[in-house]
């Protein structure tokens, strides 16, 4: 299906993914493409509108990313944001200057003339600026439609072509009426259809799965118990019924009692066809002596595939593997459509997969953000305890134990993490947090317990708020809860004498420690 898709061309902005999400929030599907995509390639797709993202470069840098100028002349509405605006102007014969004083942070803009882009905006509207360069002259056909309080050109449009540009960032929440601007561009200018809904996604995905698997194809779904894999398992079940089997691989790196909890809640609660297989000994033996986090992830990724291959051949006779890969997983693993992206960390289900697999992958939610997955889950009727369950990484506790994984460290971390999560549930804080967990730091610290010197391990607690996992802020847990967590962990978990709380946001950190 040639689905209507708003194209976001990425020029390296930290907000590119946010642009795509803001569009989707208006029930219009969007995808991110590399800035090198040609007008010819875009012309083959059902593209009603194009957005040029911001970026860290100046248009006059020798290595500055460029756009195929034919894109600006194909008649498709284009919105340039910050650097995207500068590209438009420079290609129109205008001039962009670095005057040594940019605009950063909050600013006010006011309209100079009517434009479809700024319809229904306040006379003075708060926006978020982040630029060093500014427009000096507009070039052929463009005119200013808004200026900032510093008299800098804030928004433009072309008199004859559907070309628009803004100096500020409508995609960030600090631009108070940013959603209105994006809505104006999508609907009043580009005539987009708001058909990107959870209901439509489910219908299209079921059809895709049915076409992909044919009449007889069998699928095993890697199930962890989280919302991502549960949504995938439910979609497969609706699409092909008993030809889909959910497989829960116990890799020995789970939280305390997790295997039993997952099997009970999902098999009975959701009615899915679920089988559990124990591969703990295999995973732990392969990880013995390994300390590098990227090696851990790749080993776990390969062992998952080998376990699924074994199950597929010996038990289920399946030709396909379905898994809950998300868009943030793809981006962080450097596997997005953006080309050679920097790998932040390899996700076991993306960057950690071996090349030689005996079955074909099905990734129904690969293009979704976490909040979109949850909306799909609600539409599918998944219970709240599944939808609101905190994310848990595929490699499990292997990326929450720094350095080598041992059975002793696993037991320590399981107990500490269990205490932390239980307290969050008891105090009602769990529902306010996007993700919370404990990390074992095998750094010995000196302590005093019972008048005796101790030299034991460090536990770090982590709790963050987020929407989609792309950015996150640490959660400000009340001190009395932190005190209780520290006291109970140190008193109840043998091998721990110190507890700390991680107050790092993402960026600069990641949510997980490895």
Image (cartoon, rainbow, N blue to C red):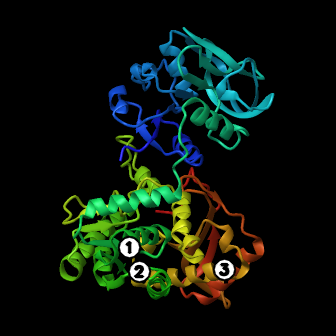
**Image depth: mark 1 or mark 3 in front:** 1
* Residue 85 screen position, x and y as percent: 56, 23
| Residue 125, placed above or below residue 477 | above
Q: Which residue is mark 1?
A: 237
Q: Is residue 301 left or right of residue 195?
A: left
In the rendered structure, which disc, 3 or 2, sits on the residue that comes first in sequence? 2
Give the structural element (helix, strand or loop) at label 1. Answer: helix
- The quadrant holding residue 220 is bottom left
Identify the residue shown where x is 72% and y is 64%. 476
Identify the residue shown where x is 59% and y is 45%. 22
Identify the residue shown where x is 44% and y is 58%. 326
Crowding near the residue tagged with mark 2, few <14, some 14–19, many ≥20 C-alpha atoms within 10 Å? many
Marks 1 and 2 close (CB-CB < 8 Å): yes
* Residue 187 screen position, x and y as percent: 59, 36
Crowding near the residue tagged with mark 3, few <14, some 14–19, many ≥20 C-alpha atoms within 10 Å? few
**Residue situated in front as seen by the camera: 225 or 334:** 225
Q: Is residue 63 left or right of residue 122?
A: left
Residue 503 visible: yes
Give the total number of marks visible in the rendering: 3
Determine the residue located farthest toward the right in the rendered image: 123
Q: Which mark is residue 425?
A: 3
Tell me how far mark 1 sits from mark 3, CA to CA. 31 Å
Q: Is residue 239 left or right of residue 308?
A: right
* Residue 205 screen position, x and y as percent: 40, 59
In the rendered structure, which disc, 1 or 3, sits on the residue that comes first in sequence? 1
Marks 1 and 3 close (CB-CB < 8 Å): no
- The quadrant holding residue 36 is top left
Give the structural element (helix, strand or loop) at label 3. Answer: helix
Give the structural element (helix, strand or loop) at label 2. Answer: loop
Q: Which residue is mark 2?
A: 272
In the rendered structure, which disc, 1 or 2, sits on the residue that comes first in sequence? 1
* Residue 86 screen position, x and y as percent: 54, 21
């Amino acid at each position: 299906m040639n689905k209507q898709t708003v194209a976001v061309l990425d020029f390296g902005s930290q907000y590119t993914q946010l642009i795509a999400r803001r569009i989707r929030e208006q029930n219009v599907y969007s995808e991110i493409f590399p800035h090198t995509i040609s007008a010819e390639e875009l012309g083959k797709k059902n593209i009603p509108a194009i957005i040029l993202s911001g970026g860290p470069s100046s248009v006059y840098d020798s290595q500055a990313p460029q756009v195929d100028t034919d894109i600006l002349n194909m008649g498709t509405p284009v919105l340039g944001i910050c650097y995207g605006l500068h590209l438009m102007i420079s290609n129109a014969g205008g001039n962009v200057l670095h005057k040594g004083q940019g605009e950063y942070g909050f600013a006010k803009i006011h309209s100079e003339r009517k434009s479809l882009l700024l319809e229904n905006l306040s006379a003075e509207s708060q926006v978020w600026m982040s630029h060093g360069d500014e427009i000096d002259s507009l070039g052929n056909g463009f005119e200013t439609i808004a200026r900032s309080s510093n008299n800098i050109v804030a928004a433009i449009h072309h008199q004859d072509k559907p070309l628009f540009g803004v100096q500020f960032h409508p995609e960030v929440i600090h631009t108070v009426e940013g959603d209105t601007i994006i809505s104006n561009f999508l609907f009043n200018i580009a005539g987009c259809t708001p058909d990107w809904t959870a209901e439509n996604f489910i219908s299209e995905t079921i059809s895709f799965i049915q076409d992909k698997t044919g009449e007889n194809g069998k699928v095993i779904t890697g199930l962890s118990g989280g919302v991502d894999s549960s949504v995938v398992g439910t979609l497969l079940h609706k699409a092909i019924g008993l030809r889909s089997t959910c497989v829960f691989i116990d890799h020995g790196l789970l939280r305390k009692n997790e295997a039993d909890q997952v099997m009970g809640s999902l098999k009975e609660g959701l009615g899915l066809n679920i089988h559990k297989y124990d591969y703990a000994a295999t995973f732990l033996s392969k990880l013995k002596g390994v300390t590098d986090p990227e090696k851990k992830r790749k080993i776990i990724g390969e062992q998952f595939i080998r376990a699924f291959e074994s199950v597929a051949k010996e038990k289920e006779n399946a030709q396909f593997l379905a898994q809950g890969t998300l868009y943030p997983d793809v981006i962080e693993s450097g596997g997005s459509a953006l080309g050679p992206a920097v790998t932040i960390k390899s996700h076991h289900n993306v960057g950690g997969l071996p090349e030689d697999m005996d079955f074909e992958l099905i990734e129904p939610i690969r293009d979704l953000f976490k909040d979109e997955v949850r909306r799909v889950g609600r539409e599918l009727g998944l219970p709240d305890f599944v939808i609101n369950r905190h994310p848990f990484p595929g490699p499990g506790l292997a990326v929450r134990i720094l350095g080598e994984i041992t059975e002793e460290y696993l037991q320590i971390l399981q107990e500490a993490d269990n205490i932390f999560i239980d307290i969050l549930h008891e105090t009602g804080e769990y529902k306010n947090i996007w993700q919370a967990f404990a990390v074992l730091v095998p750094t010995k610290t000196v302590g005093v317990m019972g008048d005796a010197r101790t030299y034991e391990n460090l536990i770090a607690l982590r709790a963050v708020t987020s929407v989609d996992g792309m950015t996150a802020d640490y959660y400000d847990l009340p001190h009395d809860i932190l005190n209780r967590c520290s006291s109970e962990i140190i008193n109840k978990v043998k091998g721990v004498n110190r507890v700390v709380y991680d107050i790092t946001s993402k960026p600069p950190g990641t949510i997980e420690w490895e």
